[in-house]
Amino acid sequence: MRSNLLGDHPGMARSYLCVGLAQMYMGDLQGAIESLQKAFKLRKRLKEFPGMADIFNDLGCVHLQRGDYQSAKELFQDAVDLNKKLPGKHVNTANCCHNLIS
């Protein structure tokens, strides 16, 4: 019932993101990926493109911790590419670029 009440609310995407980051820091990398993917799907439905770029970057960090460098690189590049398409300047672009070259 609660998920029906909140539905596609932006706060739900933020909650999934926070849970995913907590899971990553606690070492539950698979759980982090699942939570971040839920956040991504919700942000995509809501057309929150800056948030989608942030999640690409966070997913890249999880894959980097897993040792899956190719997936991490692709996700960091996706974040950079999406940030370039967004109007205005986005702070996260620098973080994404840093992660891409690290």
Image: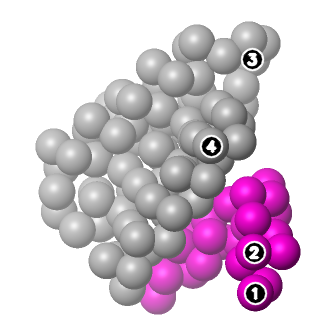
Q: For the point 56% across and 14% down, which residue is it?
A: 84
Binning the other alpha carbons within 10 Å of mark 3 as few (below 14), some (14 to 19) or many (20 upward) gives: few
Residue kind at label 2, given as amino acid type: Asn
Q: Is mark 3 on a helix, strand or loop?
A: loop
For label 3, the residue is: 89
List x then y, in percent, for residue 75.
35, 40
Q: Is residue 83 found inside the magenta-colored segment of the image?
A: no
Hey, what amino acid is under mark 4?
Arg
Distance of mark 2 from mark 3, alpha carbons? 35 Å
Quadrant hosting residue 46: top right
Q: Are marks 1 and 2 in contact (CB under 8 Å)?
A: yes
4 or 1: mark nearer the eye: 1
| Foreground: disc 2 or disc 3 | 2
What is the number of the mark on residue 45? 4
- C-alpha distance separating marks 4 and 2: 15 Å
Q: Start and end of the magenta stretch?
A: 1-26
Secondary structure under tag 1 reads loop
On the image, numbered disc 2 is attached to which residue? 4
Q: Residue at x 23, y 68 (%)?
A: 66
Return the mark for residue 1.
Answer: 1
Left/right placement of residue 43 relative to residue 6 reads left
- Nearer to us: label 4 or label 3: 4
The answer to whether residue 25 is magenta is yes
**CA distance for labels 4 and 1:** 20 Å
Query: Mark 3 belongs to which amino acid?
Result: Lys
Disc 2 crowd, CA 10 A, few/some/many (<14, 14-19, 20+): few
